[in-house]
Image: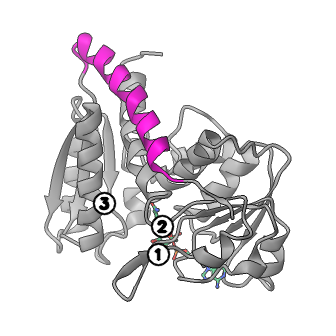
Protein backbone atom coordinates (compact mmCIF):
# COMPACT_ATOMS: atom_id res chain seq x y z
CA UNK A 1 0.00 0.00 0.00
CA UNK A 2 1.21 3.49 -0.86
CA UNK A 3 2.07 6.22 1.61
CA UNK A 4 -0.85 8.55 2.26
CA UNK A 5 0.63 12.01 1.93
CA UNK A 6 -1.42 14.52 3.85
CA UNK A 7 -1.57 18.25 3.37
CA UNK A 8 -1.46 19.25 7.03
CA UNK A 9 2.31 18.83 7.61
CA UNK A 10 2.92 20.86 4.43
CA UNK A 11 0.51 23.60 5.54
CA UNK A 12 2.00 23.63 9.05
CA UNK A 13 5.53 24.05 7.71
CA UNK A 14 4.48 26.93 5.43
CA UNK A 15 2.60 28.57 8.33
CA UNK A 16 5.58 28.21 10.66
CA UNK A 17 7.80 30.08 8.19
CA UNK A 18 5.12 32.71 7.60
CA UNK A 19 4.67 33.41 11.32
CA UNK A 20 8.36 34.33 11.51
CA UNK A 21 8.25 36.44 8.33
CA UNK A 22 5.14 38.31 9.49
CA UNK A 23 6.72 38.95 12.88
CA UNK A 24 9.74 40.60 11.33
CA UNK A 25 7.52 42.68 9.02
CA UNK A 26 5.45 43.81 12.01
CA UNK A 27 8.63 44.78 13.83
CA UNK A 28 9.05 47.32 11.00
CA UNK A 29 5.41 48.46 11.23
CA UNK A 30 4.47 46.65 8.05
CA UNK A 31 1.17 44.76 8.36
CA UNK A 32 0.37 42.37 5.49
CA UNK A 33 -3.30 42.51 4.58
CA UNK A 34 -5.65 40.48 2.38
CA UNK A 35 -8.94 41.73 0.92
CA UNK A 36 -11.44 39.06 -0.09
CA UNK A 37 -14.07 40.11 -2.62
CA UNK A 38 -17.15 37.91 -2.47
CA UNK A 39 -20.25 38.51 -4.57
CA UNK A 40 -23.29 37.04 -2.80
CA UNK A 41 -22.95 34.19 -0.32
CA UNK A 42 -22.42 30.87 -2.14
CA UNK A 43 -21.80 28.06 0.33
CA UNK A 44 -18.52 26.91 -1.29
CA UNK A 45 -17.21 30.51 -1.25
CA UNK A 46 -18.15 30.80 2.43
CA UNK A 47 -16.41 27.51 3.25
CA UNK A 48 -13.21 28.60 1.51
CA UNK A 49 -13.46 32.04 3.11
CA UNK A 50 -13.66 30.54 6.61
CA UNK A 51 -10.52 28.49 5.91
CA UNK A 52 -8.69 31.51 4.46
CA UNK A 53 -9.59 33.77 7.41
CA UNK A 54 -8.51 31.13 9.90
CA UNK A 55 -5.18 30.60 8.17
CA UNK A 56 -4.51 34.35 7.90
CA UNK A 57 -5.29 34.78 11.60
CA UNK A 58 -2.95 31.93 12.48
CA UNK A 59 0.00 33.48 10.69
CA UNK A 60 -0.77 37.10 11.63
CA UNK A 61 -1.97 38.33 8.22
CA UNK A 62 -4.86 40.79 8.44
CA UNK A 63 -7.89 39.98 6.33
CA UNK A 64 -11.12 41.75 5.47
CA UNK A 65 -14.12 40.55 3.50
CA UNK A 66 -15.95 42.75 1.01
CA UNK A 67 -19.33 41.15 0.48
CA UNK A 68 -21.00 42.62 -2.59
CA UNK A 69 -24.65 42.34 -3.60
CA UNK A 70 -25.36 39.34 -5.89
CA UNK A 71 -26.85 41.73 -8.48
CA UNK A 72 -23.99 44.26 -8.41
CA UNK A 73 -23.38 45.88 -11.79
CA UNK A 74 -20.09 45.66 -13.67
CA UNK A 75 -19.49 49.40 -13.14
CA UNK A 76 -20.02 49.18 -9.37
CA UNK A 77 -17.88 46.05 -9.11
CA UNK A 78 -15.05 47.79 -10.92
CA UNK A 79 -15.39 50.81 -8.60
CA UNK A 80 -14.98 48.52 -5.57
CA UNK A 81 -12.03 46.76 -7.15
CA UNK A 82 -10.31 50.03 -8.01
CA UNK A 83 -10.72 51.19 -4.40
CA UNK A 84 -8.83 48.08 -3.28
CA UNK A 85 -6.21 48.53 -6.01
CA UNK A 86 -5.59 52.06 -4.69
CA UNK A 87 -5.71 51.21 -0.97
CA UNK A 88 -2.08 51.15 0.11
CA UNK A 89 -3.00 49.12 3.21
CA UNK A 90 -4.27 46.22 1.08
CA UNK A 91 -1.49 43.98 -0.26
CA UNK A 92 -3.45 41.10 -1.74
CA UNK A 93 -6.86 40.80 -3.41
CA UNK A 94 -8.76 37.52 -3.79
CA UNK A 95 -11.90 37.57 -5.93
CA UNK A 96 -14.10 34.50 -5.57
CA UNK A 97 -14.98 32.91 -8.88
CA UNK A 98 -17.05 32.09 -10.81
CA UNK A 99 -18.58 35.55 -10.80
CA UNK A 100 -22.32 35.92 -11.48
CA UNK A 101 -23.34 36.16 -15.12
CA UNK A 102 -23.81 39.97 -15.19
CA UNK A 103 -20.11 40.47 -14.36
CA UNK A 104 -17.56 40.25 -17.14
CA UNK A 105 -14.41 38.52 -15.87
CA UNK A 106 -12.69 39.19 -19.21
CA UNK A 107 -12.70 42.92 -18.35
CA UNK A 108 -12.13 42.50 -14.60
CA UNK A 109 -8.98 40.42 -15.05
CA UNK A 110 -7.30 43.42 -16.72
CA UNK A 111 -8.32 45.74 -13.88
CA UNK A 112 -7.10 43.90 -10.78
CA UNK A 113 -3.63 45.18 -9.95
CA UNK A 114 -1.16 42.41 -10.95
CA UNK A 115 0.93 43.27 -7.85
CA UNK A 116 -2.06 42.45 -5.61
CA UNK A 117 -3.49 39.60 -7.70
CA UNK A 118 -2.54 36.73 -5.38
CA UNK A 119 -4.60 34.02 -7.13
CA UNK A 120 -3.58 34.61 -10.74
CA UNK A 121 -6.60 36.25 -12.32
CA UNK A 122 -4.54 38.85 -14.18
CA UNK A 123 -3.04 37.87 -17.57
CA UNK A 124 0.22 39.38 -16.26
CA UNK A 125 0.46 36.69 -13.60
CA UNK A 126 -0.73 34.01 -16.00
CA UNK A 127 2.12 35.05 -18.31
CA UNK A 128 4.59 34.89 -15.43
CA UNK A 129 3.54 31.28 -14.73
CA UNK A 130 4.18 30.47 -18.39
CA UNK A 131 7.60 32.15 -18.29
CA UNK A 132 8.54 30.68 -14.90
CA UNK A 133 8.99 34.26 -13.60
CA UNK A 134 9.16 33.88 -9.84
CA UNK A 135 7.97 37.43 -9.16
CA UNK A 136 4.39 36.45 -10.08
CA UNK A 137 1.59 34.70 -8.26
CA UNK A 138 0.66 31.30 -9.72
CA UNK A 139 -2.83 30.16 -8.75
CA UNK A 140 -2.92 28.82 -5.19
CA UNK A 141 -4.27 25.32 -5.87
CA UNK A 142 -1.71 24.14 -8.47
CA UNK A 143 1.03 25.73 -6.39
CA UNK A 144 -0.25 23.76 -3.39
CA UNK A 145 0.22 20.61 -5.51
CA UNK A 146 3.84 21.60 -6.19
CA UNK A 147 4.45 22.34 -2.49
CA UNK A 148 3.12 18.90 -1.52
CA UNK A 149 5.40 17.19 -4.05
CA UNK A 150 8.37 19.21 -2.80
CA UNK A 151 7.58 18.50 0.86
CA UNK A 152 7.48 14.75 0.23
CA UNK A 153 10.71 14.89 -1.83
CA UNK A 154 9.15 14.07 -5.19
CA UNK A 155 11.58 15.67 -7.65
CA UNK A 156 9.79 16.27 -10.96
CA UNK A 157 12.95 16.74 -13.05
CA UNK A 158 12.88 14.24 -15.91
CA UNK A 159 9.67 12.61 -14.67
CA UNK A 160 6.64 11.86 -16.81
CA UNK A 161 3.75 13.85 -15.35
CA UNK A 162 0.18 13.47 -16.57
CA UNK A 163 -2.31 16.14 -15.57
CA UNK A 164 -5.96 15.15 -15.96
CA UNK A 165 -8.05 18.30 -16.30
CA UNK A 166 -7.08 21.39 -18.27
CA UNK A 167 -8.87 24.35 -16.67
CA UNK A 168 -7.16 27.75 -16.47
CA UNK A 169 -7.33 27.68 -12.66
CA UNK A 170 -5.96 24.21 -11.94
CA UNK A 171 -5.02 21.79 -14.73
CA UNK A 172 -3.22 24.05 -17.20
CA UNK A 173 -1.12 25.95 -14.63
CA UNK A 174 -0.30 22.67 -12.82
CA UNK A 175 1.07 21.32 -16.10
CA UNK A 176 3.14 24.45 -16.75
CA UNK A 177 4.51 24.50 -13.18
CA UNK A 178 5.57 20.85 -13.65
CA UNK A 179 7.14 21.69 -17.02
CA UNK A 180 9.04 24.56 -15.36
CA UNK A 181 10.53 21.90 -13.07
CA UNK A 182 11.72 20.00 -16.14
CA UNK A 183 9.10 17.29 -16.11
CA UNK A 184 7.73 15.87 -19.36
CA UNK A 185 4.06 16.70 -19.33
CA UNK A 186 0.90 15.23 -20.81
CA UNK A 187 -2.40 17.05 -20.33
CA UNK A 188 -5.70 15.16 -20.63
CA UNK A 189 -9.18 16.66 -20.88
CA UNK A 190 -12.72 15.73 -21.76
CA UNK A 191 -11.81 15.11 -25.43
CA UNK A 192 -8.66 13.07 -24.78
CA UNK A 193 -9.01 9.76 -26.65
CA UNK A 194 -7.61 7.48 -23.97
CA UNK A 195 -6.93 9.20 -20.66
CA UNK A 196 -6.33 5.90 -18.84
CA UNK A 197 -3.52 5.07 -21.28
CA UNK A 198 -1.82 8.48 -20.99
CA UNK A 199 -2.19 8.42 -17.23
CA UNK A 200 -0.97 4.85 -16.74
CA UNK A 201 2.40 5.75 -18.29
CA UNK A 202 3.07 8.58 -15.84
CA UNK A 203 5.38 8.69 -12.83
CA UNK A 204 3.18 11.39 -11.31
CA UNK A 205 -0.55 11.82 -11.95
CA UNK A 206 -2.29 15.07 -10.99
CA UNK A 207 -6.08 14.88 -11.22
CA UNK A 208 -8.31 17.97 -11.31
CA UNK A 209 -11.60 17.18 -12.99
CA UNK A 210 -14.50 17.11 -10.53
CA UNK A 211 -15.77 13.58 -11.23
CA UNK A 212 -15.80 11.17 -8.31
CA UNK A 213 -14.19 7.80 -9.05
CA UNK A 214 -12.85 8.85 -12.48
CA UNK A 215 -9.34 7.57 -11.84
CA UNK A 216 -9.35 3.83 -11.30
CA UNK A 217 -6.51 1.30 -10.90
CA UNK A 218 -6.00 1.03 -14.66
CA UNK A 219 -5.17 4.79 -14.79
CA UNK A 220 -2.13 4.36 -12.55
CA UNK A 221 1.11 2.45 -12.98
CA UNK A 222 2.64 0.55 -10.08
CA UNK A 223 4.60 2.94 -7.84
CA UNK A 224 3.23 6.18 -9.31
CA UNK A 225 2.59 9.29 -7.20
CA UNK A 226 -1.06 10.38 -7.31
CA UNK A 227 -2.25 13.86 -6.39
CA UNK A 228 -6.03 14.28 -6.22
CA UNK A 229 -7.25 17.86 -6.51
CA UNK A 230 -10.90 16.98 -7.12
CA UNK A 231 -13.61 17.89 -4.64
CA UNK A 232 -16.92 16.04 -4.92
CA UNK A 233 -19.74 15.24 -2.56
CA UNK A 234 -21.15 11.72 -2.85
CA UNK A 235 -23.89 10.61 -0.47
CA UNK A 236 -23.10 13.61 1.72
CA UNK A 237 -19.41 12.69 1.94
CA UNK A 238 -16.48 14.62 0.53
CA UNK A 239 -14.28 12.72 -1.95
CA UNK A 240 -11.81 13.37 -4.74
CA UNK A 241 -11.62 12.21 -8.36
CA UNK A 242 -9.57 9.12 -7.54
CA UNK A 243 -10.95 5.75 -6.47
CA UNK A 244 -8.81 6.08 -3.36
CA UNK A 245 -9.22 2.61 -1.82
CA UNK A 246 -8.20 0.78 -5.00
CA UNK A 247 -5.58 3.21 -6.32
CA UNK A 248 -3.74 3.46 -2.99
CA UNK A 249 -2.78 -0.20 -3.38
CA UNK A 250 -0.84 0.61 -6.57
CA UNK A 251 0.49 4.11 -5.91
CA UNK A 252 3.71 4.74 -3.99
CA UNK A 253 2.21 7.96 -2.61
CA UNK A 254 -1.32 9.33 -2.75
CA UNK A 255 -3.09 12.40 -1.34
CA UNK A 256 -6.38 11.89 0.50
CA UNK A 257 -9.58 13.94 0.04
CA UNK A 258 -10.32 15.60 2.39
CA UNK A 259 -6.98 16.33 4.05
CA UNK A 260 -4.84 16.62 0.93
CA UNK A 261 -4.41 19.47 -1.55
CA UNK A 262 -7.32 21.48 -0.14
CA UNK A 263 -5.64 21.83 3.23
CA UNK A 264 -2.56 23.46 1.68
CA UNK A 265 -4.30 26.01 -0.57
CA UNK A 266 -5.04 28.62 2.11
CA UNK A 267 -1.40 28.50 3.31
CA UNK A 268 -0.29 29.38 -0.21
CA UNK A 269 -2.83 32.20 -0.21
CA UNK A 270 -1.38 33.62 3.02
CA UNK A 271 2.14 33.12 1.66
CA UNK A 272 1.21 35.13 -1.43
CA UNK A 273 -0.16 38.00 0.69
CA UNK A 274 3.15 38.16 2.55
CA UNK A 275 5.10 37.93 -0.72
CA UNK A 276 2.99 40.73 -2.26
CA UNK A 277 3.48 42.84 0.86
CA UNK A 278 7.26 42.40 0.73
CA UNK A 279 7.42 43.19 -3.00
CA UNK A 280 5.27 46.31 -2.49
CA UNK A 281 7.61 47.43 0.30
CA UNK A 282 10.78 46.61 -1.67
CA UNK A 283 11.81 43.97 0.86
CA UNK A 284 13.80 41.05 -0.52
P1 LIG B 1 -13.32 22.67 -14.48
O1 LIG B 1 -14.70 22.11 -14.57
O2 LIG B 1 -13.07 24.09 -14.81
O3 LIG B 1 -12.36 21.78 -15.41
C1 LIG B 1 -12.46 20.39 -15.46
C2 LIG B 1 -11.48 19.84 -16.46
O4 LIG B 1 -11.61 18.42 -16.47
C3 LIG B 1 -11.71 20.32 -17.90
O5 LIG B 1 -10.46 20.62 -18.49
C4 LIG B 1 -12.33 19.10 -18.60
O6 LIG B 1 -12.01 19.02 -19.99
C5 LIG B 1 -11.71 17.96 -17.82
N1 LIG B 1 -12.52 16.74 -17.83
C6 LIG B 1 -13.85 16.62 -17.63
N2 LIG B 1 -14.22 15.33 -17.73
C7 LIG B 1 -13.10 14.63 -17.98
C8 LIG B 1 -12.85 13.25 -18.21
N3 LIG B 1 -13.83 12.33 -18.17
N4 LIG B 1 -11.57 12.87 -18.46
C9 LIG B 1 -10.57 13.79 -18.51
N5 LIG B 1 -10.75 15.10 -18.30
C10 LIG B 1 -12.02 15.52 -18.06
O7 LIG B 1 -12.82 22.33 -13.00
P2 LIG B 1 -11.64 23.00 -12.09
O8 LIG B 1 -12.07 24.33 -11.63
O9 LIG B 1 -10.33 22.82 -12.78
O10 LIG B 1 -11.68 22.02 -10.83
C11 LIG B 1 -11.41 20.64 -10.96
C12 LIG B 1 -11.67 19.96 -9.64
O11 LIG B 1 -10.77 20.49 -8.66
C13 LIG B 1 -13.07 20.19 -9.06
O12 LIG B 1 -13.48 19.04 -8.37
C14 LIG B 1 -12.87 21.33 -8.08
O13 LIG B 1 -13.83 21.32 -7.05
C15 LIG B 1 -11.50 20.99 -7.55
N6 LIG B 1 -10.76 22.12 -6.97
C16 LIG B 1 -10.10 21.90 -5.82
C17 LIG B 1 -9.38 22.90 -5.22
C18 LIG B 1 -8.62 22.61 -3.96
O14 LIG B 1 -8.14 23.52 -3.29
N7 LIG B 1 -8.46 21.35 -3.59
C19 LIG B 1 -9.34 24.18 -5.81
C20 LIG B 1 -9.97 24.38 -7.04
C21 LIG B 1 -10.69 23.33 -7.62
How far is mark 3 from mark 2, CA to CA? 15 Å
- The extreme front residue here reads 1
Vertical comparison of 19 with 15: above or below: above
Q: Secondary structure at mark 2?
A: loop
How far is mark 1 from mark 2, CA to CA? 5 Å
- The extreme bottom residue here reads 235
Vertical comparison of 273 with 193: above or below: above
Q: Which residue is mark 2?
A: 257
Is residue 109 on the magenta stretch?
no
Dividing the picture into quadrants, the one containing residue 47 is: bottom left
* Ligand 1 within 8 Å of the CB at mark 2: yes
Q: Which residue is mark 3?
A: 48
Q: Nearer the viewer, residue 98 or 20?
A: 20
The residue at the point 44 percent across, 48 percent down is 8
Magenta segment, which residues?
A: 6-30
Residue 169, horizontal then vertical, whole percent: 52, 61
Give neighbour class at mark 3: few <14, some 14-19, many 20+ (Cα, 10 Å).
some
Q: Which residue is mark 1?
A: 239
Q: Is residue 122 left or right of residue 207?
A: left
- Asked if the residues shown at circle 1 and circle 2 are in contact, with their CB atoms under 8 angstroms apart, the answer is yes
* Ligand 1 within 8 Å of the CB at mark 1: no
What secondary structure prevails in the magenta region? helix
Placement of the N terminus among the 4 image quadrants: bottom right
The residue at the point 24 percent across, 72 percent down is 43
The residue at the point 78 percent across, 72 percent down is 199
Q: Is residue 21 left or right of residue 147?
A: left
Residue 241, horizontal then vertical, whole percent: 56, 76
- Asked if the residues shown at circle 1 and circle 3 are in contact, with their CB atoms under 8 angstroms apart, the answer is no
* Ligand 1 within 8 Å of the CB at mark 3: yes
**Front of the two marks 1 and 3:** 1
Work out whether mark 3 precedes mark 2 in sequence or the reverse, and give the earlier one.
3
Amino acid sequence: MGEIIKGKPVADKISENLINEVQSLKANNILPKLAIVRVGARSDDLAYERGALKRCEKVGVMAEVHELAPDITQADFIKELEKLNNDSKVNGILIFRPLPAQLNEEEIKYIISPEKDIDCLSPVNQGKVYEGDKSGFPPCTPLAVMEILKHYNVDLKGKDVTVIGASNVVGKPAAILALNQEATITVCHIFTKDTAKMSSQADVVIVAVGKAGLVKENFVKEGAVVIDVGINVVDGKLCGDVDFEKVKEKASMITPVPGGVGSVTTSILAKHVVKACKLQNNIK
